[in-house]
Amino acid sequence: MGYEIKLDIFQGPLDLLLYLIKKNEIDIYNIPIAVITEQYLEYIDVMKSLNLDVAGEYLVMASTLIHIKSKLLLPVHDDTEDEEDPREELTRQLLEYQAFKEAALNLDTMNLLGRDVFKGGYLVGSETDGEHSLEELSIFELVEAFKVMVSRINPGEIMEIDVERMSLSERMNEIMERLNKEKALTFNDLLGGLSDRIKIIYTFLAILELMKLRVIKAYQSKPFGTIRIFLAVED
Amino acid sequence: MDNLKAIVEGIVFVSESPVGLKKLKGILKDVEGKEIIKALDDLVEEYDKRNGALCLVEVAGGFQFRTKDNFSPWIRKLTDIKPVAISQAAMETLAVVAYKQPVMKAEIEKVRGVDVSGTLKGLLKRNLIRMIGRKDVPGRPIIYGTTKKFLEVFSLKDLSELPTLRELKELGE
């Protein structure tokens, strides 16, 4: 798990490098690696001294810079004349990042609906808009709902005579088929009508498995509310 | 139909999302597409000439009434309006998805040089991007693309209206 940098001035190591290049008025096609590496490491030291978590990405870039620097220091053999400049990959990355950073700024200047322009009924529409106010569920809330479902079965009423062989993939397919047809299902639709413990467990496992595969998603509009299940991939 | 323009106006006014020509054709069965387009064009012009707060714009494959951008300072003062805000990090991730789609998370991370799990999740939640499917390579990574809502929010007719990305100059020219 990566930890996030709390200093929001830079959007990552590439952003910091671009800043240094601009600040020093350096030609991006001919980066003086020694100078830039030194300044880059200074910045990281400052971040550390401010007690900021320096995200791993910054450290990876630091080692890349040092690696390039060491490569440039090594004598070049005559027979490897065609070998590419070790800075080339970095320059390409910086140029690409720069282009997208610009694109992001351009996007931000567009007329944003809800910021610069508004449509009718915006007040009602935006926040209470059914679908989008649904909170995505974690496995834990599902397990909670499952416990409630199982507790509803009265064990006295059930007599199992023959244990039907059931397969997980069969249940998964059934759920997918129903979802394809009905678009949205509630947790109750899938588990409510079942009285067979094994079938409930298999159905629940199938839901978890499908969530893990990210083909379905579960949402809830409020704590203990109805759990709705959708296909994660449209079309 | 002599009141066609008024009917179209009414439909577009009430609709929650941009109304496309297809939808209008479905409602106005015996009217020719050409006439509907003419009615829409006339309406756009009328609202333009009227010089009011509203305009009829073509976004996300349909038409929608919106306030003009120069009225936003007043409209934002309406209670309960929290203006849409997208952080720079999210905007950068969104830009990469928009221009490179269909795109994998690893590709976005390569361009931005940082972990993008958080911003991707946020954009998915806001319905600006969606999972298109999975790439047929080992690990079956998810591929992402922008949504219709993205076009609507950014006032774009379609993806071709995105401002052109600065050409990446080839190295060693």
Image (cartoon, coloured by chain):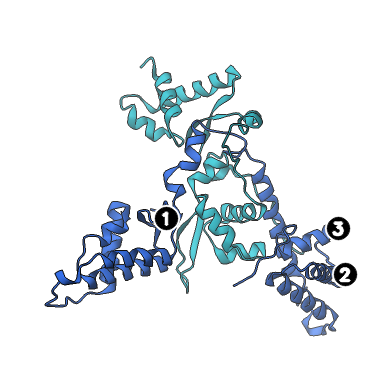
Q: Residue at x 29, y 62 (%)?
A: A175
Residue B24 vertical placement versus A94 (above, below):
above
Residue drawn at x 71%, y 74% as measured from the top left: A60
How far apart, in angstroms, are the residues tagged by discs 1 and 2? 55 Å
Q: Secondary structure at mark 1?
A: loop
Q: Which of the numbered marks, if any, corresponds to residue A23? A: 3
Q: CA distance from mark 2 to mark 3?
A: 12 Å
Query: Which of labels 1 and 2 is toward the front?
Result: 1
Residue type at numbered disc 2 = Val
Chain letter for the blue colouring in the rendering: A
Q: Quadrant of the C terminus of chain B?
A: bottom right
What is the spatial separation of the Cα atoms under label 1 and label 3, in whole angstroms? 51 Å
Q: Secondary structure at mark 3?
A: helix
Amino acid type at circle 3 is Lys
Label ID, residue A223 = 1
The colour of chain B is cyan
Q: Which residue is mark 2?
A: A35
